[in-house]
Image: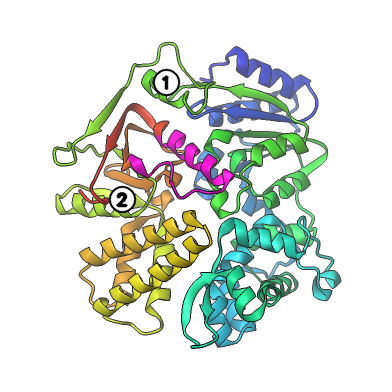
Amino acid sequence: MFETTPRHQRIFDFLQNGAGHAAIIALAGAGKTSTMVEAAAKILEQNPETEILACAFNATIRTELAARMPRDVAVKTLNGLGWGALRSHSPRCQLNKNRTQEMIWHFLSEADANVYGPALSKLIGLAKSGGLVPDTEATQRAGAEGILEDNPENWNNLIQRFGILVPEITAESGTVTQGRLIDFARRILSEGRLIDFARRILSEGITRGQMADFDDQLYMTVALGLPIQKFDWVIVDEAQDLSPLQHELISRALADGGRLLAVGDPNQAIYGFRGADSSSMPRLIERFSMETFSLPVSYRCPKVIAELARKHCPEFESLPNAADGQIQHLNPHQMAWDPSDLVMCRNSAPLIGLAYDLIRKGIGCQVLGRDIGAGLAAMAKRANGKQNRDLGVFEERLRRHAESQIKRLQSQEKEAQAEGVADRRDTILIILENTEATDVNGLISDIFAMFTAENGKKKDVVTLCTVHKAKGLEAPRAIILDSHLMPSRMARQDWEKEQEKNLIYVAQTRALQTLAYLETAEGQT
C-alpha cells in the first residue's frame, strides 16, 4: 500500500491539475519506483484513455517495472522504443551486436583495421551517443540529420574527453606502440584521416539499414527522423544518466501537448565515462522548463548511513523511526560471511582476488558484470595477437601492452584512463594466476566464466560487483572493499571528479542495516 506523504501529494496534484513537465529529484532509497507507479495510476485515474510510456534504464529493470505498473502503461527501454521505430521503417533489419566491428573490417584494409579498430569502435559509439551524424552526400540523400554538428571541434572534444587510444606506428621503425588517437593522427596520417574513417563507417551504417547494433537502435531512429509512437505522458527513470541522443528520443516520443516526468538523482550520476551526459538531469530540467520536486527521505537507509550521505548531499534524510544502523571495519582474516552480503569496489581487480579467495574457502559467490568480462577478454586478445599462445608468453605480452598504453595516457595527462588500463591488466593477471588453462583461449573462457549477468543474479551467494554495477541494489550488509580507491586520484576533469564523489554516495547508500569496510593488501585477502 503506497503511503502518500505531503511531498508526494504536491507531485500528484501537479500531475493531475497542473500544466507542463515535472522532474522529481529522488534521493537514494526514496522509493522512486513506487512513486513512478503511483504517478501513472493517478494520471490514469483522472483520464483512463491517457497514453503513458514508462522508460526503464535497462532490460532487467524494464521487466521489474512492467510487473508493477498499471496494465495500460507501455513499459519499454529507450532502446526498445527506438528499435520498434527502426523495425517499422525496415522490417528486415536484424540486430547484430558486432555490426560496428564488422563494418570496420569491411571498409578498412586489414592493416588499418588492426591499427585503428579498438579506437574507432569507441569513437563511433561515443559519436552515436552524442547524436553526431556525418554530413556526407550519402547521409544527405538519406535525409539524415544529427543533433551534434559534424565539425572537427566536436570530434576533437570526443577524443579529448574520453582519452581514446589507438596504436601508433613510429615512422622510423614501423613498430607498433600505444598512443592517443589525436597523437597518432598528428604524427602519422593527420587527424582528418582518422576522423574520416569514423565518418565513413557512420555514414555507411546509416544508409545500409539491414543490420543494426544496440547503439543504432537509438542513433538511426533519430538520425533518419523515423516516426515513433507518441504518448500523452512519458515517465523516465534514472534521468541522471541519459545521453544527449536519449534526450532527443524522449522529446520525439511526446505527443503534441504531451508531458514529461523525469525521475532521478543527480548525486547518482556515474555513467559519464560511457557517453551519458554528466549534467543530464539539469539539462532536461532546462530544456523542458520543468517544475522540480524533491523526495529527500530514504526508506532504505538507517540513521548512521543518512549521516554519511549528508556529507555528499545535505538534503538527505532518513525516516524518523529508522533504525540506528551500524558501521563496521572488518578483519579480512576473521570474516563471517553471509549469503546476503553485497561487496562493492571501485575497481575490478580486488573483487576478482576476493572471489578466488572465497572460492578456495568454499564460500559461494558471484561477480556481476558480463560486460566487464567482455572488456577484459578484448584486452587479452589485443595483447595476445592472432596466435593462441601459451600463458607464459602471454603474460609478458600483456604487461608490455598495458605498460605502453599507460605511459602514453599519462604523458597526455589522461590519468583516469590510465588507471582503467592498469585495473584491467591487474584483473587479468589475477585470473591468470588462478586459472587451470594452458593457453589464451582457455584463459578467455575463464574470464567470461567469472562474471554473471545482472539478470542472472543468484540470491543465495555473496554478491561482488563494482560500484557502478551496484546501482539499484541493496543489502542488509553492504561492504565497501578497498575504500581508498574512491575517489580515484586519477580523475582530472571536473565531471570525472564529481562522478567519483557520486560513487562513494552510491556505495554507502546500498546498506539496509550495516555499512562495512574491508581493506585488503593489493586487492588480495
Question: Left of 212 or right of it: where is 168?
Answer: left
Nearest the viewer among 253 and 243 is: 243
The amino acid marked with disc number 2 is Leu
On residue 382, the disc is: none
The residue carrying mark 1 is: 307
Q: Where residue 355 sits: x, y (%)?
A: 25, 52
Question: Left of 475 or right of it: where is 311?
Answer: right
The residue carrying mark 2 is: 351
Q: Residue at x 55, y 60 (%)?
A: 163
Provide the residue span drawn in magenta. 483-507
Query: Please, what is the dominant secondary structure of the magenta stretch?
Result: helix
Q: Where residue 59 sits: x, y (%)?
A: 53, 49
Q: Residue at x 52, y 22 (%)?
A: 314
Choose top left, top right, bottom left or bottom right for residue 86: bottom right
Nearest the viewer among 69 and 22 is: 22
State whether residue 358 is above or below residue 445. above
The amino acid marked with disc number 1 is Glu
Q: Secondary structure at mark 1?
A: helix
Nearest the viewer among 159 and 337 is: 159
Q: Where residue 240 sits: x, y (%)?
A: 60, 39
Q: Where residue 301 sits: x, y (%)?
A: 41, 24
